[in-house]
Image (cartoon, rainbow, N blue to C red):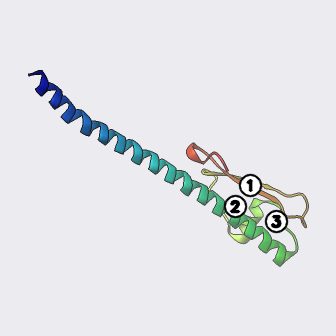
Amino acid sequence: MRKNISGVVLTILIPVLILSFMIGSMHSSLRHMGKDVAAEDRQQLENAIRRAAVACYVAEGFYPPDMDYITQHYGVQADTQRYHVFYEIFAENIMPQITVTGRGSFMDSP
């Protein structure tokens, strides 16, 4: 009788453990993919801002004074709910420092 109970417990316990492991692995993989996508989106925005700044310099002879200028004249818009954009200009003939960082959960690091 005892042998049957332990056999039933093992028959139920092993699939439950395997299923739990699989769910945990899938969750971890999806989270990692989300981080990769967020980092790529952030990098694309930073590159778009940088390209617009260079295009402005080539066309107008100066780097844009701020992000508003880039948005108005070059159409690059940053989602301020998702990103912090740091656009620091020293002089109109020196490439500005451009940094985009994510806001919230897994996008906190640049």
Judged by depth in the image, the label closer to the viewer, 1 or 3, is 1
Separation (CA) of disc 1 from disc 2 = 7 Å
The residue positioned farthest toward the bottom in the image shown: 59
Question: At numbered mark 1, what does the secondary structure look like: helix, strand or loop?
Answer: strand
Q: Which corner quadrant holds the N terminus?
A: top left
- Left or right side of 77 for 19: left
Q: Label 1, on which residue?
A: 99
Residue annotated with mark 3: 64
Residue 77 in percent (x, y) is at: 66, 62
Q: Which residue is drawn at 41% across and 45% down?
A: 25
- Asked which secondary structure carries label 2, the reply is helix
In the image, what residue occupies the spot 35% across and 45% down? 22
| Amino acid carrying mark 3 in the image | Pro
CA distance for labels 1 and 3? 15 Å
Do tag 1 and tag 2 residues touch (Cβ < 8 Å)?
Answer: yes
- Quarter where residue 48 is shown: bottom right
Residue 24 is left or right of residue 33, and the answer is: left
The image position of residue 58, as x and y in percent, is: 83, 77
Which kind of residue does numbered mark 2 sit on? Glu
**Mark 3 vs mark 2: in front:** 2
Q: Name the residue under label 2.
A: 46
Q: Which amino acid does label 1 sit on?
A: Thr
**Residue at point 82%, 78% (across, down):** 59
- Whether 36 is drawn above or below 93: the answer is above
